[in-house]
Amino acid sequence: MINDANLDAFKENQEVKEVDTSRKVKIGIIGTGWIAQSHANAYKKLSDVEIVALADIVPGKAEAFAKANGLSGARIYNSDKEMLDNEKDLDGVSICTYNCQHAAPTINALEHGVNVMLEKPFTVTLDEAIAVMKAEKKSGKILTIGFQPRMSDNMKMIKKIVDSGELGKIYYMQAGGGRRKGIPTPFGTTFIEKETGGVGAVGDIGSYSLDMLLEAVGYPKPLTVTGYTSNFFGTDPDYYAKINHPEYAKKFGVDDFAAAFIRLEGDIILDFRISWAMNMDTAGDALILGTKGGLRIPSTECWNGEFDKPLTIYKDIAGSQVQYQVPLIPNKPNEPSLFVKKLRAFVDSIKEGGVATVPTSQIIYNQAIIDGICRSAELGREVEIKIPEI
């Protein structure tokens, strides 16, 4: 039986840093929809940050957001360009626009010499992501992608286990989870229309699932993708009966379910599936299989935060098949949320001249897979992933 000494090998000590509040980091928020609410709430918890500007292309939306969030001192703009042209002292921006408008304001901010926290997914297409990375490289500024699960000690444990060699060589991974009924319509149709969302479940919550598994094995390059997407639920007026919006079915232009078979460098196979809606409670637990052991990651709907059950490792020891659990790491008293930790890391990188916590050099592979799934589904065949040098 594995004892505490074995499990302690995965632990690490963390020191709490003292925050220097002598200079406030000046932040702007571009796009004032519902995810911007989470950014504003998190920034307000950071004593060394001041939200100085808000921008939204919808007339009156940024003003209403400022009022609702107690940001009376923030200057209001009608576009990212107007904000960036006038706010000469911005240290960073959070880009919280809808998916199809991730690339343009990010490039604009980088060209203005401003550091960027970009909400996931990175972009909608691979070509957009490449254009953003070119602007990032030219600017020399920080661009980090908003995957707050990276801040979770329990999520970090997955990579620690893989890196420890406990599982041996990884050869297969399975993505599971997904929602039974969870098309994101409480905030209107921004997520589900092609012109704004661009992609559906595959980009919205599938990007989290991909990041969790790819990060664990060092983000290997994707080589080929065979993908499938469907929208049986989103295009059915009966789905929206409870919210009394049957007209949403005609506006639905993205996927509500996606699956794929992905070949990665290092002879690793990734079996992927994700859903906003399906006739099942889960597509299963996430699995990482190695030559010396296997890891089961308990299913969640989105993979966008913590999980509430322990990891389980399966091995053969002394001729016997055994399994043991890695206990969940509990939150410390008054510990910040993962979202606050995400923005704390971004602000620290700005102040210390550091690097992106979630770098585009990794997430370009995440985006390439999403792009590959969509292209493969449209073409009805396997596609090769080609990413140019940037």
Image (spheres, helix red, strand yellow):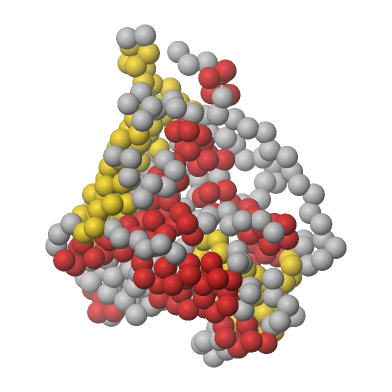
Number of numbered callouts drawn: 0
Residue at the extreme front of the image, as rendered: 389
- Location of residue 48 by image quarter: bottom right
53 in relation to 137, above or below:
below
> Would you say residue 109 is visible in this rendering?
yes
Q: Horizontal and vertical percent for residue 114?
A: 63, 73
Residue at the extreme left of the image, as rendered: 380
Residue at the extreme right of the image, as rendered: 22
- Location of residue 373 by image quarter: bottom left
Q: Residue at x 51, y 65 (%)?
A: 119
Left/right of residue 292 with respect to residue 328 in the rendered view: left
Quarter holding the N terminus is: top left
- Location of residue 344 by image quarter: bottom right
Q: Horizontal and vertical percent for residue 229?
A: 22, 61
Q: Residue at x 28, y 52 (%)?
A: 223
Q: Horizontal and vertical percent for residue 290?
A: 34, 30
Quarter holding the C terminus is: bottom left
Q: Residue at x 57, y 48 (%)?
A: 151
46 in relation to 222, above or below:
below
Q: Residue at x 55, y 71 (%)?
A: 138
| Depth order, front residue of 137/41 | 137
> Would you say residue 294 is visible in this rendering?
no
Residue at the extreme top of the image, as rendered: 318
Q: Horizontal and vertical percent for residue 103?
A: 46, 74
